[in-house]
Image: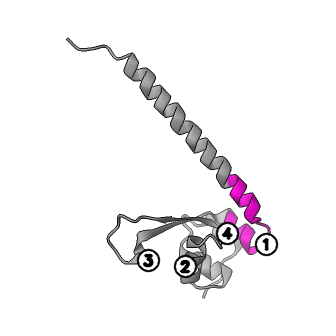
Amino acid sequence: MGKYTDEEIRNCKKVTLKIAGDYLGISPNAVGIGMRNNLLPIGLAIHNEEKDRRFSESWSYHIVAERLIAYNHGTISEIHVQNIEKGLDKIVEEFSNLKQELLFILSENEVPEN
């Protein structure tokens, strides 16, 4: 397994399970399982139940380089990560509400066709 430096991780266009595993010194499979079970707070594991494939292929992963680096150095706190994610969820929810309100306003202003 190759070992990556922090700078190499930061410069990766996409951090894959293999790259993260090499960086952490564990298997890519362990990275995926850890992310799916919320034991490895380095990004998001998204399950797409609609995909008619093998179980492992129905998951996609987004690994955040800075989270991976912080986790590797023991400086990431699960509570801190949860608070960030809750904040992001709230922002997304507020934007969704604003979008719905805007669509409603726009629909009221439409000129009926004759």
Q: Which image quarter is the N terminus in?
A: bottom right
Of the numbered discs 1 and 2, the one sitting upstream in the chain is: 2
Q: Position of residue 37 (x, y in %)?
A: 59, 73
The Cα–Cα distance between marks 4 and 1, rounded to whole angstroms, is 10 Å
Name the residue type under label 1.
Answer: Gly
Q: Are marks 3 and 4 in contact (CB under 8 Å)?
A: no
Count neighbours of disc 3 (C-alpha within 10 A) and say few if under 14, some if 14 to 19, many if 20 or more: few
Stretch of the chain drawn in magenta: 67-84
Question: Main SS of the magenta segment?
Answer: helix
Furthest-bottom residue in view? 1
Classify mark 3: helix, strand or loop.
helix
Choose top left, top right, bottom left or bottom right for residue 54. bottom left
Name the residue type under label 3.
Answer: Ser
The Cα–Cα distance between marks 2 and 3, rounded to whole angstroms, is 14 Å
Of the numbered discs 3 and 4, the one sitting upstream in the chain is: 3
Count neighbours of disc 4 (C-alpha within 10 A) and say few if under 14, some if 14 to 19, many if 20 or more: many
| Residue picked out by circle 2 | 18
Of the numbered discs 4 and 2, the one sitting upstream in the chain is: 2
| Residue picked out by circle 1 | 74
- At x 45% / y 21%, what residue is drawn? 105
Q: Are marks 4 and 2 in contact (CB under 8 Å)?
A: no
